[in-house]
Amino acid sequence: MSNTIIQVKNLVKTYGTFEAVKGISFDVNEGEIFGLLGPNGAGKSTTLEIIETLRDKTSGEVIVNGFNLDDNPNEIKKIIGVQLQASGFYPGLNLVELINLFAGLYNEETDPIELLGKVNLVDKAKSKFKELSGGQKQRFSIATTLINKPKVIFLDEPTTGLDPQARRNLWDLILDIRKQGTTVIITTHYMDEAEVLCDRVAIIDNGKIIAINSPSQLIDDLVESGFERPIQVKKANLEDVFINLTGFTIRED
């Protein structure tokens, strides 16, 4: 039986009279990829930011690897990795310098070239972040989440705007991170992505969790309810055609 690494109990977040998160509860198992899915404004990003210690909660309880958010937020910060957006990187520093900077902030000994090798960016070691393509920026951003050897990493829509090759390459990277024993929490608007990557997903709407299970089980439950697609589902989709014709190799700008 898997150990629980994150526990969220009756989490509430209000802004004045607006209740963004309405008493949600869920657990995340150690070593799984767990997806938070929902439309814009559903409350998933707010929930993640609370767990990440970046936003205060109104009420409820959050426990990460045994540490209570109310009592030990600094201990939680030490064991998590959070994907930064582009604005989080100093434009004048190259990738090696950026890794050394973040390693210093974490007080960690890190080999920048080894870390860049994990995300296939060794050849860009001396390049500045602003000089990277979209896929390269996302891979580097994920690399920075690994600097402090975290138990849990948080990825917020990591493949948005990427071309099919870069997107699937990032899927492989995320799966490989999970194979190393790291728990991954991910948000995405791509349901095929969640279906491929996630062991379990929680679907949030209007600040409440309306379903939680494995993607496969959620699909089976829908089919058993009598749902039928209006057209026959094909064995491949247009993205598969694109990848098959153009190849899996990433095209860097």
Image (cartoon, grey):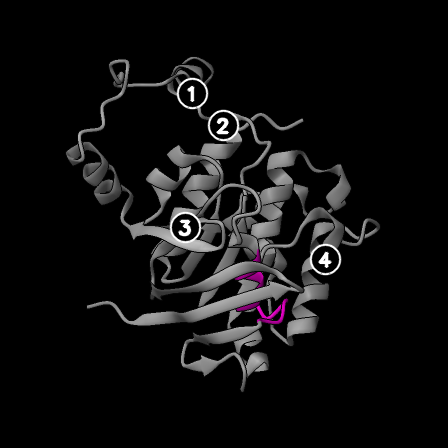
- Labelled pair 3, 2 in contact (Cβ < 8 Å): no
Residue drawn at x 18%, y 35% as measured from the top left: 225
At label 4, which amino acid type do we have? Leu
Q: Quadrant of the C terminus?
A: top right
Observer-side mark, 2 or 4, equals 2
In the image, residue 53 lies in the stretch drawn in magenta:
yes
Residue 231, disc: none
Return the x and y of residue 236 as percentages of the image width and height.
31, 18
Disc 1 and disc 2: Cα gap in Å?
9 Å
Q: On the rendered structure, is 24 left or right of 3?
A: right
Residue wearing tag 1: 239
Question: Which residue is most to the right?
Answer: 92
Residue wearing tag 4: 98
Residue drawn at x 24%, y 67% as measured from the top left: 2
Q: Earlier in the sequence, mark 1 or mark 2?
A: 2
Q: Note whether 95 is above or below 102 in the view shown.
A: above
Observer-side mark, 3 or 2, equals 3
Observer-side mark, 1 or 3, equals 3
Residue drawn at x 41%, y 41% as measured from the top left: 172
Residue wearing tag 3: 35
Disc 3 and disc 2: Cα gap in Å?
22 Å
